[in-house]
Image (cartoon, rainbow, N blue to C red):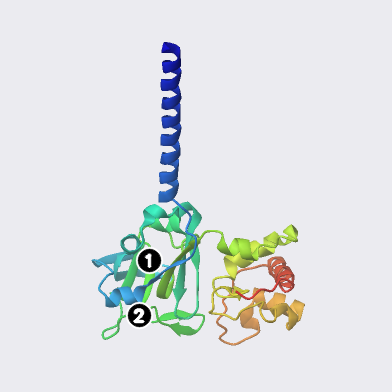
Amino acid sequence: MKTIKIHSIISCLFIFGLFSCNQKKELKAEKTTTIPTEIKLDLLDLQQKNKLGKDTIVTIVNDPVYHKAKKYKGVSAVAIIKNEIDLTKIDPKNTKIVFECIDGYKPEMPLELFLSAKPYLAFEDMDAPKGKQWETILKDGNEMNAAPFYIVYPSVSEKDSQYKWPYNLIKIYLEPLHKSTLELYPLKDRKLEAGYNLFQKQCLTCHSLNGIGGTMGPELNYPKSVTEYWKEKELVDYIVNPASFRHKVKMPTLGLSQQQSQQIVDYLKYMSENKKKN
């Protein structure tokens, strides 16, 4: 009888321990689940409701947009996100932050990287001319305005391309990290991965493919692919040097080689056979 009791006790302890471990795993998983769909923050709406938080003066040693030292009034971007979103239920390693600007520019970066950089949401330019809220941005012969918001990083090098400095900003999204990867990756031809990677890095912030990406430039695949109405050689040359085709063109010179441009065009040709309206 004693032996049976001992076995019963051991069995109970084992089952209890197993339940406790599983319970802990479930709780941990519940706290750090990957975001299933996008979460959107309307920054203008938060400003109107006085929900941006306490402002401070932010100094940027070498601003990558104005190319000089700048001072702004801003609020902690991390604090805004934490106040509006329960980050204990999101896994930052598997989530990305997407920035939506008025002009359609839509850059993105890993959420974990963004949070660790301690960025600020600037809403006023302290160096602006008298009577103005922002100093005018001059880029490729075009004048632009940073209003209403501009993401800045006091402790990040302006040369580090991992970090995005979107101005003209109005909304922030949180999405699954690999959302565009799953939709746009060339699964049927892995040799096109180089072109895919270049497109992701250089083009997707301004242009969309199958409805995924920025809207600053035109959609490149739906209903007609750009490869269906541009001559291939001219399209390759245009991507390398847009200004050689159009005066005051908005598309910047990306510093791509002829070979890299061809890789992007080869990828776009593949996508022309994989159209999907999102």
The C terminus, quarter of image: bottom right
Residue positioned 73% across, 78% down in the render: 227
Location of residue 256 by image quarter: bottom right
Q: Which residue is mark 1?
A: 152
Position of residue 276 in the picture relative to residue 206 (left or right): right
Q: Amino acid at mark 2?
A: Glu
Depth order, front residue of 79/25? 25
* Label 1 environment density (alpha carbons within 10 Å; few <14, some 14–19, many ≥20): many
Location of residue 3 by image quarter: top left
Q: In the image as oriented, which residue stretches furthest toward the front?
A: 1
Q: In the image as oriented, which residue stretches furthest toward the top?
A: 2
Mark positioned earlier in the residue sequence (2 or 1):
2
The N terminus, quarter of image: top left
Q: Is residue 271 above or below residue 24?
A: below
Mark 2 to mark 1 CA distance (whole Å): 15 Å
Depth order, front residue of 3/151? 3
Q: Which residue is mark 2?
A: 135
Residue 111's label in the rendered image is none
* Label 2 environment density (alpha carbons within 10 Å; few <14, some 14–19, many ≥20): some
Position of residue 169 in the picture relative to residue 203 (left or right): left
* Percent position of residue 101, x then y: 45, 76
* Percent position of residue 205, x then y: 54, 71
Depth order, front residue of 111/90? 90
* Percent position of residue 108, x then y: 49, 65
Asked if residue 193 can be seen in this view, the reply is yes
Position of residue 188 in the picture relative to residue 51 (left or right): right
Residue positioned 41% across, 17% down in the render: 5
Circle count: 2
Q: Amino acid at mark 1?
A: Val
* Percent position of residue 28, x then y: 42, 45
Label 1 secondary element = strand
Location of residue 253 by image quarter: bottom right
